[in-house]
Amino acid sequence: MPARHVLVTGASRGLGLEFVRQLLAAGDHVVATCRRPGKATALNTLAGEHPGRLHVLPLDVTDPKSHAELARELPLVLGDDGRLDLLVNNAGVLHSGERFGSLTAANFEDSFRTNASGPLLLTQALAPLLADRARVLNLSSQLGSIAGTRRFGTPSYNLSKAAQNMATVLLAHALAGRGIVVVALHPGWVQTDMGGAGADLPATEAVAGLLRVAAGLSPDDSGRFLDWQGRAVAW
Ligand code: NDP
């Protein structure tokens, strides 16, 4: 089987970096994107170890100019006829410590751009470069589940992930004609900078689970909200 072309956002650390590691180990050709490639030490080390199979490109998911620049550069690394088989919209932000009484518009704006409109606009910009029957994985969170909310939480994150879930469903409709499957995936509570050291799962296990779920997706799954073990999450 020829190597798949895969693009991962927010690949500098955490789950994004682990996606890159496991996709490389599976033999894929990976385009790892991050805000500051010059500072992405772990990614640059991996690129040195996998010449020609890992390209590190700049991308700020909140910035449509950055999306357009990436769309212009991608054919240079994919080849003129190359298309993405898998897009992992992983980049995300959580502004911790929010309290009712001191919520700020700035946190909502940043979270919405990073977690919700960013992945939607990026997928739109890259749509011409997606292969027919490609997979788009939107890293969502159980904290975006309205039905699952039992406490006050972190509103800028909760709202933006709920909005991202709607973006997943809309993208599933927009891309259905090309057989492209778009899903919202909850990775579990994972030991990263965002999840903290006390979280349930190491990133290795969460990403292995998410990639297993991705490999088993069928067109009927498009627009669904699943966790890292393939179980449905309530909207
Ligand atoms: P981390 O905080 O560890 O890493 C976040 C990544 O997103 C970093 O690479 C960061 O880059 C990148 N990023 C943030 N903003 C932008 C931006 N504007 N443009 C490009 N990249 C950006 O988070 P995790 O790895 O834990 O989370 C990955 C995804 O999984 C997120 O979408 C998160 O919401 C989701 N998730 C995580 C859970 C967990 O328990 N960890 C639970 C549920 C969902 P930089 O290094 O430049 O800051």
Image: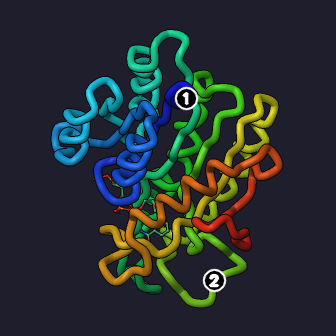
Which residue is at a point 17% across and 46% down the rendered structure image?
41
The answer to which of 82 and 94 lies nearer the viewer is 82
Note whether ligand 1 is within 8 Å of mark 2. no
Which residue is at a point 36% across and 38% down the rendered structure image?
33
Q: Secondary structure at mark 1?
A: strand
Left or right: 197, with 112 as reference point: left
Q: Residue 119's x, y, as percent?
A: 53, 45
Which residue is at a point 50% across and 55% down the rendered structure image?
115
Q: Secondary structure at mark 2?
A: loop
Relative height, residue 124 to residue 154 (above, below): above
Relative height, residue 18 to residue 74 (above, below): below
Relative height, residue 153 to residue 10 (above, below): below
Q: Residue 141's x, y, as percent?
A: 56, 68
- Residue 98 badge: none
The amino acid type, in three-letter code, at marker 1 is Leu
Q: Residue furthest bottom?
A: 151
The amino acid type, in three-letter code, at marker 2 is Thr
Provide the residue designation for mark 2. 149
Q: Residue 7's x, y, as percent?
A: 46, 36
Quadrant the N terminus occupies? top right
Left or right: 90, with 96 as reference point: right
Left or right: 138, with 105 as reference point: right
Provide the residue designation for mark 1. 84
Note whether ligand 1 is within 8 Å of mark 1. no
Neighbor class of circle 2 (other Cα within 10 Å; few <14, some 14-19, many 20+) is few
Q: Residue 235's x, y, as percent?
A: 72, 69
Q: Residue furthest front?
A: 1
The picture quadrant for ligand 1 comes to bottom left
**Residue 51 in sight here:** yes
